[in-house]
Amino acid sequence: MNIKQALKNSFSYFFYFYGYLRHRVFIALTLSLFVGLLDGFGLAMFIPLLQMLDGSNAKGGGDLGNLDFIPQLMGTLGVEFNITSVLILILIFFTLKGVAQFIQGYVAVIYQQYFMREIRVTNIKLLNVFKFSEFVKADSGRIQNTFSGEVEKINMAFKSYLAVLQYASLISVYLILAFATNISFATMVTIGGAATNFIFKFLYSKTKEHSRKVTVEAHYFQGLLIQYVAFFKYLKATGLNLMFGKKLTDNINRIEYFQRKIGFLGSLLTGLREPLTILVVVVVILIQVRFLDAQLGTVILSLLFLYRALTFLMALQEHWNKFLAVSGSLENMTNFIEELKSGHETNGTIKFKEFKDRISLRDVSFSYGKTKILDSLNLTIHKNETVAIIGESGSGKSTLVNMLSGLLPPTAGEFVVDGIPLSQIDHYTFKNRIGYIAQEAPIFSDSVYNNVTFWAEKTPENYKNFIEALKKASIYDFVMRLPKKEEEELGNNGINVSGGQKQRLSIARELYKEVDFLFMDEATSALDAETEVAIQNNIDELKGAYTIVIIAHKLSTVKNADRIILMGKGRIKAEGSFQELLNNSKVFQNMIRLQGLETSIS
Ligand SMILES: Nc1ncnc2c1ncn2[C@@H]1O[C@H](COP(=O)(O)OP(=O)(O)OP(=O)(O)O)[C@@H](O)[C@H]1O
């Protein structure tokens, strides 16, 4: 059962790599076979050479077991088998082996790089088409760790696995040569070698167990680190950073503990290997010489091959152990890719060129698992209408906007754009027409220009559009006052600009694009009163030129919206103009009172 499982595992690893490399695996293996064969033939020539040197075999040959075909072939070719020709032959074999080894090494590097590229590109491609609804459920620490640290470990795993395959083919060549030379001697040594393997197997399984634990802890570490950096200000201000730091330290200690165990097992393996191997060889030679009347030439040649095989077996075991130490990552990567694949979004084929008329939600519901977040919504938004969405916290405003922007597909009902269900439209052509101003304005670690234009070339036309976008977003003066103007670096996550400025830059980025829709998720929440008025004026200016959907908490900012949608518990509770809601909705009137707006309205 165990052997069956081991074989199954080995094959699943093989097919894992084969899935990426295909015929390349066999090319790598064939090259190893060549190296082994050439080395074996070269080694075989030392026996007649030694015998010729001490005069026990003047003509050479005759003591190579089944390898006698080499001197025989030379005889047929009319080449005399003497010291000079044997020396030249040794030189030829080892030179060819060197050439084969060079090709083998270089090819291995090429394949390794190819493999890494494939893994990285596959991951990026799958992440590109990963459903947003799946992404929000995913562990960001795991995603980050798998994309960076784990990919490096997979690289190590691949290197070790390829080495294992290459050593395995070399070992098989040496074993064939050893058996061909002296079958009884070779059999006994092989049985002895197999017996020592039981000790190693136990150590391997322990190594693998710890490797899995390291991977789990590494994910946790990345997750904690991301949160530590993201919430650094809060943690620092409250002194909770020390407690959070302790969580990280504990995690680091656990990783160190498991890595130390892996190191201990690895060292034990290295230390045990040679004494055990030599023990086997010594016992077998004693038996061969004492009890079986073995021919010394073939025993020595067979031993030479076996010794070579054993040396490579040691190297193989070392690489196999290295492979197992990172095999947890391989399993993780396989599962990760499977998860990414299962969260693959489906895409329509109809190209969306330009928004013409209206978007509609028809009896749309949305659930996270069993929890219904949006419940049977019907809503139509016309081209260039400005719609504000209001409602208490958790009423489903963000979810509604995520749906209207195509981020979340409905779990029931239909989202229709200009009469075509979004499911039939090529999402990317639709998203190209969308400007999104999120609560947390994403600022990339680059210059103002690149942040706004999203790395567009600095042509006169792009520059003109860039300046226009800055002006529309009321950030032009600020940018022009910066020491390097639009080339000023914004720093990691926009640390060098205020919350309000980040949002204005984010608005500028959206206005720079040629979009039909502007979705704003509490875009004015982090602004001071004066800037808020400026942005509000700008939105009013954009009104009528874009289809605008704003999530707002401050009712004063939505006074000019064409329509206000009041959400409550995942449903539309009321809709209409500001005045209509004021006249008809008790909830709205209450909200107005709570925000102290009665006087400003009257
Ligand atoms: N990834 C998620 N998994 C499960 N439930 C979620 C998820 N995201 C949001 N929810 C739930 O969906 C409901 C609606 O959330 P949503 O963010 O749309 O509300 P909101 O009206 O925008 O709230 P707020 O004004 O506080 O931002 C909430 O009850 C929230 O807990």
Image (cartoon, grey):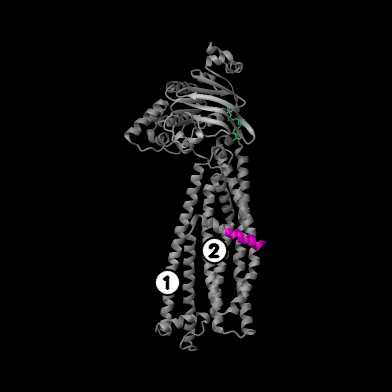
Question: Which residues are drawn in magenta?
Answer: 1-11
SS type, badge 2: helix
Q: Which percent across, then down, holds residue 512?
A: 40, 31
Residue lying at the far left in this picture: please name it: 460
Q: Is residue 441 left or right of residue 394?
A: left
Residue located beneath label 2 in the image: 164
Q: Nearer the viewer, residue 128 or 276?
A: 128
For label 1, count other residues whose C-alpha is less than 10 Å away and answer few (under 14), some (14-19) or many (20+): some
Q: Which disc, if any, is residue 590?
A: none
Asked where in the image residue 302 lies, by quadrant, the reply is bottom right
Q: Is residue 39 left or right of residue 188?
A: left
> Magenta region, mostly helix, strand or loop?
helix
* Quadrant of ligand 1 in image: top right
Looking at marks 2 and 1 on the same chain, the residue that comes earlier in the sequence is marked by 1
SS type, badge 1: helix
Asked if 82 appears above or below 275 in the picture, the reply is: below
Q: Amino acid at mark 2?
A: Val
Residue located beneath label 1 in the image: 96
Disc 2/disc 1 C-alpha distance (Å): 22 Å
Q: Which quadrant is the N terminus positioned in?
A: bottom right
Q: Which percent across, then down, holds residue 200?
A: 63, 65
User: Residue 7 colored magenta?
Assistant: yes
Asked if 86 appears above or below 508 in the picture, the reply is: below
Residue lying at the far front in this picture: please name it: 419
Q: Nearer the viewer, residue 140 or 374?
A: 374
Q: Is residue 18 left or right of residue 462?
A: right
User: Residue 579 colored magenta?
Assistant: no
Asked if 217 appears above or below 97 in the picture, the reply is: above
Image point 62% across, 53% down: which residue?
A: 212
Q: Which percent across, then down, holds residue 26?
A: 49, 63
